[in-house]
Image (spheres, helix red, strand yellow):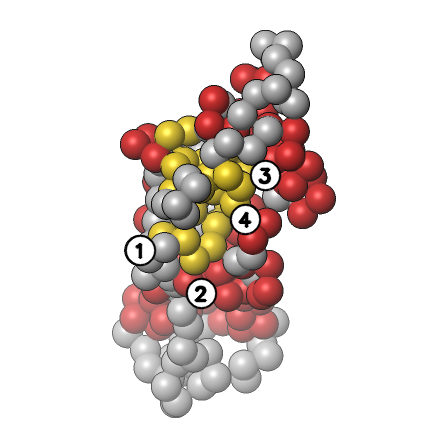
């Protein structure tokens, strides 16, 4: 909000904002101006809501870590090697590939705990394909998918890692990446509202 809001008493603005905070969430200042039938002296700040943030943009924030050979393993690899890969790269899942390079499924740290540690199996003598989630049950997203849709998929299926597939694997997003995107968006909105309340736009 770079422009000057006219005709809205400051106390009314504050009351509307605080009332909304105790309600359903964060109120955009554009909505406040419309609610009181007022206009700004300059165009409102261009703000990109989460509904317009794509998976590819979240991947871009991950920088060089978004894609690499460490993101996957082979179906016939020993589980111990997959675990070492995840530990060394501080990640929680690996896409599993068949010898010809096609996706076979996904293996996560949770798979290793539930199907190896909890069952007393040997991570050295067990192959990844024995504990992975098979491709037929694999949940994936595309890079142009809305991040809110991706978050809904992860929530509804109780999963924390989703491969990004555009005909081939282009990356991986986790629930941590999604939460970070939400927090960054809301932090920016809260700052703008706080600045407005304090009069920094006057």
**Which badge, 4 or 3, comes first in the chain's sequence?**
4
The answer to whether the residue labelled 1 contacts the one labelled 4, judged by CB atoms less than 8 Å apart, is no
Where disc 4 sits, the SS reads helix
Sequence-first disc among 1 and 3: 3
Cα distance in 3D space between marks 3 and 2: 21 Å
User: Mark 1–mark 3 contact, CB under 8 Å?
Assistant: no
Give the left or right position of residue 201, taking residue 41 as reference: right
Tell us which disc is closer to us: 2 or 1.
1
Residue at image position (35%, 38%) is 139
The numbered disc on residue 167 is: 1
Q: Mark 3 = which residue?
A: 92
For label 2, the crowd category at 10 Å Cα-Cα, with few meaning under 14, some 14 to 19 and many 20 or more, is: some
Calculate the distance from the C-alpha at mark 1 to the C-alpha at mark 3: 23 Å
| Marks 4,2: beta carbons within 8 A | no
Callout 3 crowding tier (Cα within 10 Å): few <14, some 14–19, many ≥20: some
* Position of 90 relative to 184 (above/below): above
Q: Which residue sits at x=42%, y=72%? A: 47
Residue at numbered disc 2: 57
Q: Residue at x 71, y 44 (%)?
A: 88
Provide the residue designation for mark 4: 71
| Label 4 close to label 3 by CB (< 8 Å) | no
Q: Quadrant of residue 86?
A: top right
Mark found first going from the N terminus, 4 or 2: 2
- 1 or 3: mark nearer the eye: 1
In three-dimensional space, the C-alpha distance between marks 2 and 1, rounded to whole angstroms, equals 18 Å
Q: Nearer the viewer, mark 4 or mark 3?
A: 4
């Amino acid at each position: 909000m770079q422009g000057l809001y006219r005709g809205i008493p400051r106390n009314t603005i504050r009351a509307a904002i605080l009332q909304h905070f105790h309600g359903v969430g964060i109120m955009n200042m554009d909505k406040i101006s419309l609610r009181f039938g007022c206009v700004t002296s300059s165009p409102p700040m261009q703000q990109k809501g989460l509904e317009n943030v794509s998976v590819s943009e979240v991947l871009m924030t991950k920088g060089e870590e978004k894609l690499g050979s460490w993101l996957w393993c082979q179906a016939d690899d020993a589980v111990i090697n997959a675990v070492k890969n995840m530990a060394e790269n501080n990640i929680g899942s690996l896409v599993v590939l068949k010898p010809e390079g096609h996706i076979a499924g996904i293996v996560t740290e949770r798979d290793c705990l539930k199907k190896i540690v909890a069952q007393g199996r040997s991570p050295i003598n067990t192959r990844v394909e024995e504990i992975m989630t098979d491709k037929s049950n694999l949940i994936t997203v595309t890079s142009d998918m809305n991040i809110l849709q991706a978050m809904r998929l992860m929530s509804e299926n109780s999963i924390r890692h989703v491969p990004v597939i555009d005909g081939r694997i282009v990356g991986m997003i986790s629930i941590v990446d999604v939460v970070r995107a939400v927090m960054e968006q809301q932090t920016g909105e809260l700052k703008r509202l706080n600045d407005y309340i304090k009069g920094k736009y006057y």
